[in-house]
């Protein structure tokens, strides 16, 4: 693997060996993920490489804005965030540097990474449909398109259109269907709402269980948390709700990623690339994915997760996730035009 900065690093080490010897190798990671398994992941990276991880955590958009505001003096080496749409926003701000790594290009499938290596997906999640088992029979709803059927009028729950998960889903539908059909779908779903868009995906599931609506769009791992919980109130929700993998006879279920890229101004580029490559390792993929009931992007990684196993296998939409970011501005405009707030 060729890296153009190796010669510079070697010359610098030769000239300033005493000073460098005193410096501890580090990588500064800005992350929007907040899972205990990620902490163990970073500890394992340090144990394997001797490189200390300095972690800065925050919410997605503010953390991206922080790197932009820090500019050329940003200490950030790596940005980790969720959703290809947010990775696209950071890319559009010029925050990422392309990384050429044979390991990453070999292990991460092309549709889960930026074509120029500006970011890589390390775990993926699915946008599913949940339904109330007492009000909806199995097989009654199978596709995203079904949510636009007038039979569901007053029966659909969903969160705000400004939520990046909904933006990415509509972005995918725009790519598959074209703008006109995607707009008609958004209008019809909005007309079928049982209540104004509100709350989180967890709130949508609770509303379905409570009978406030019969179906809802959610990321699968929110449902998985109810299945994994031993709290009586969560177990009660899980008993009343079931999940559908949409579009199994068509494009496949829409999926999105958690991903990371090297910051353009990274002060520790060598460490940043080693960190990204570690995230694609067998060990890291298990930690990175299972910590939030997601799936590894690296194929054939072996892991144990009884909740994910209980959800079964399904066909995913192979659409390159890069498209989700590119189509998001149009998706937001469509949502605004149809009044899906």
Image (cartoon, grey):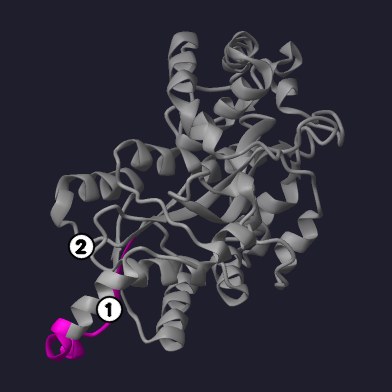
Q: Does any portion of residue 199 appear in the rendered image? A: no
Label 1 sits on a secondary structure element that is: helix
Region rendered in magenta: 15-30
- Residue at screen point 63% across, 67% down: 230
Residue 35 horizontal/vertical position (percent): 46, 66
Residue 194 horizontal/vertical position (percent): 59, 22
Which quadrant of the view contains residue 61?
Answer: top left
**In-front residue for pair 15/208:** 15
Indicate left or right for 101 with 107 as reference.
Answer: left
Residue 219 horizontal/vertical position (percent): 60, 44
Label 2 sits on a secondary structure element that is: loop
Label 1 Cα crowd, 10 Å radius (few <14 / some 14-19 / many 20+): few
- Residue at screen point 53% across, 43% down: 115
Indicate left or right for 74 with 196 as reference.
Answer: left
State the mark number for residue 75: 2
Indicate left or right for 286 with 81 as reference.
Answer: right
| Real-space CA distance between mark 1 and mark 2, rounded to the nearest whole angstrom | 22 Å
Q: Answer above or below: position of 206 versus 29.
A: above
Indicate left or right for 300 with 210 as reference.
Answer: right
- Residue at screen point 67% across, 18% down: 177
Q: Answer above or below: position of 200 versus 196.
A: below
Which quadrant of the view contains residue 235?
Answer: bottom right
- Residue at screen point 40% across, 83% down: 46
29 inside magenta stretch = yes
**In-front residue for pair 109/101:** 101
Residue 137 horizontal/vertical position (percent): 85, 33
Which quadrant of the view contains residue 248?
Answer: top right
17 inside magenta stretch = yes
State the mark number for residue 10: 1
Task: Give yes or no for contact between labels 1 and 2 (Cβ–Cβ under 8 Å).
Answer: no
């Amino acid at each position: 693997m060729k890296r153009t900065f190796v010669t510079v690093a070697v010359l610098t080490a030769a000239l300033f060996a005493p000073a460098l010897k005193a410096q501890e190798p580090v990588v500064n990671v800005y992350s929007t993920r907040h899972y205990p398994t990620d902490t163990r992941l970073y500890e394992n990276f340090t144990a394997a490489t001797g490189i200390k991880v300095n972690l800065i955590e925050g919410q997605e958009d503010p953390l991206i804005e922080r790197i932009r505001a820090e500019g050329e003096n940003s200490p950030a080496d790596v940005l980790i965030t969720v959703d290809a749409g947010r990775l696209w926003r950071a890319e559009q701000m010029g925050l990422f540097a392309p990384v050429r790594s044979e390991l990453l290009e070999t292990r991460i499938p092309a549709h889960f990474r930026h074509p120029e290596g500006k970011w890589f997906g390390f775990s993926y999640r699915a946008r599913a449909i949940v339904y109330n088992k007492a009000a909806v029979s199995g097989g009654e709803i199978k596709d995203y398109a079904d949510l636009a059927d007038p039979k569901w009028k007053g029966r659909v729950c969903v969160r705000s259109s400004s939520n990046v998960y909904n933006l990415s889903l509509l972005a995918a539908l725009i790519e598959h269907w074209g703008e006109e059909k995607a707009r008609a779908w958004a209008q019809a779903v909005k007309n079928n709402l049982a209540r104004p868009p509100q709350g989180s995906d967890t709130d949508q599931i609770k509303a379905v269980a409570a009978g406030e609506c019969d179906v809802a769009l959610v990321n699968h791992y929110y449902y998985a948390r109810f299945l994994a919980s031993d709290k009586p109130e969560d177990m009660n929700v899980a008993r009343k709700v079931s999940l559908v993998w949409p579009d199994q006879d068509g494009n496949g279920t829409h999926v999105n990623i958690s991903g990371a890229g090297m910051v353009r101004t990274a002060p520790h580029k060598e460490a940043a690339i080693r960190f990204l490559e570690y995230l694609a390792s067998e060990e890291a993929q298990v930690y990175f994915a299972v910590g939030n009931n997601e799936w590894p992007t690296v194929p054939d990684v072996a892991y144990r997760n009884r909740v994910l196993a209980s959800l079964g296998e399904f066909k995913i939409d192979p659409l390159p996730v890069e498209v989700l970011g590119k189509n998001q501005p149009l998706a937001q405009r469509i949502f605004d035009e149809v009044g899906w707030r």
